[in-house]
Image (tube, helix red, strand yellow):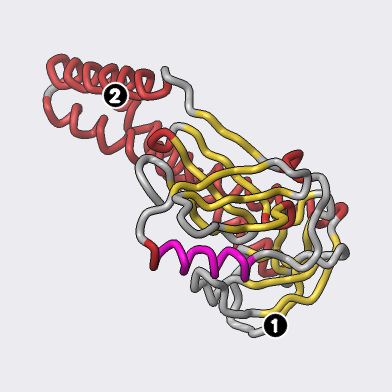
Amino acid sequence: MQGSSTAALGPDHLTLTKDGGRVRIEIPYAVIKRVAMADGETQIRILLTDQKTYWIPVGNPTATEAFLTSLEKALPEERDPAGSVFVVTKEKRAGDAWMRWSALLVFLGYTIWIGVAYYVDMALLTVVATLAALFGLVCFVSVAGKIRHRVICARRGITVLCTLPQHPNGWPEHFTFTDTSGNVHHSNGKTRNQTGYVVYAPERPSINVIRQPLGWLLVKYSFGLIVPLGILGLGVLGLAVPYL
């Protein structure tokens, strides 16, 4: 795309970014009615099923043609008439960058103070412990989110057959499945088999999981929670060492 705007194809939606990434728009494929670009135009026209229109500025003709072809292939046969109701717009607040820099400066100041008050080795320990705690926390939240999706699908999910095709973006490890409305979606689950079963939430098919044996899931997620918690605990302990 061109300038500060970008467009990318996801598993089940088109993602647009504007103003250097400050504004992010996610458009499900099922609500896109038509994609077109007339001769002489410098923008791709995205028409939704409720007639709302989005525009994507373009640059290189070859890249534009390839993008249009991939996008058209990703669109399902049946569309949702709700249109823009399912479009998600996220906008970064102006103060987000300021808050991140402030937090970094506070941490830097704290580390320097630890080094002055408790020797340099304690300052290095503080840096390592902080990184370990953050890594453990991120991993724990990620695994907890996957477990949440499993619980949602187990409570009210629909099980359908899925296959392993070649996605337009070139993701052969991602499954594709068709929901009860006839719309095609892509699953983030991975397996070595060419076919399998996916369980998805009917109100939000993007929440889906590959069906796997219960014993394997218990082992996988127990390990996936215990290890990050251990890393997080060691990180917190490392931060407390200067005061012990």
Task: Please provide percent x and percent y for residue 98.
Answer: 35, 19
Residue 191 x, y percent position in the rendering = 60, 76
* Residue drawn 25% across the image and 18% down it: 110
Bin the neighbour count of mark 1 within 10 Å (Cα to Cα): few under 14, some 14-19, many 20 and up: some
Question: Which three-letter amino acid code belongs to the residue tagged 1?
Answer: Thr
Q: Nearer the viewer, mark 2 or mark 1?
A: 1
Left or right of 13 in this view: 128? left
Residue situated in front as seen by the camera: 25 or 163: 25
User: Mark 2 highlights which residue?
Assistant: 104
* Left or right: 161, with 135 as reference point: right
The answer to whether any part of residue 93 appears in the image is: yes
Read off the residue under disc 1: 195
* Residue range (magenta): 63-74
Q: Main secondary structure of the magenta part?
A: helix
Residue 15 image offset from top left, x and y in percent? 54, 49
Q: Secondary structure at mark 1?
A: strand
Label total for image:
2
Quadrant for the C terminus in the image:
top left
Residue at the (59%, 58%) spot, across then down: 36
**Magenta stretch: residue 203 in it?**
no
Q: Is residue 214 visible?
A: no
Circle 2/circle 1 CB separation < 8 Å: no
Q: Earlier in the sequence, mark 2 or mark 1?
A: 2
Quarter of the image holding residue 232?
Answer: top left
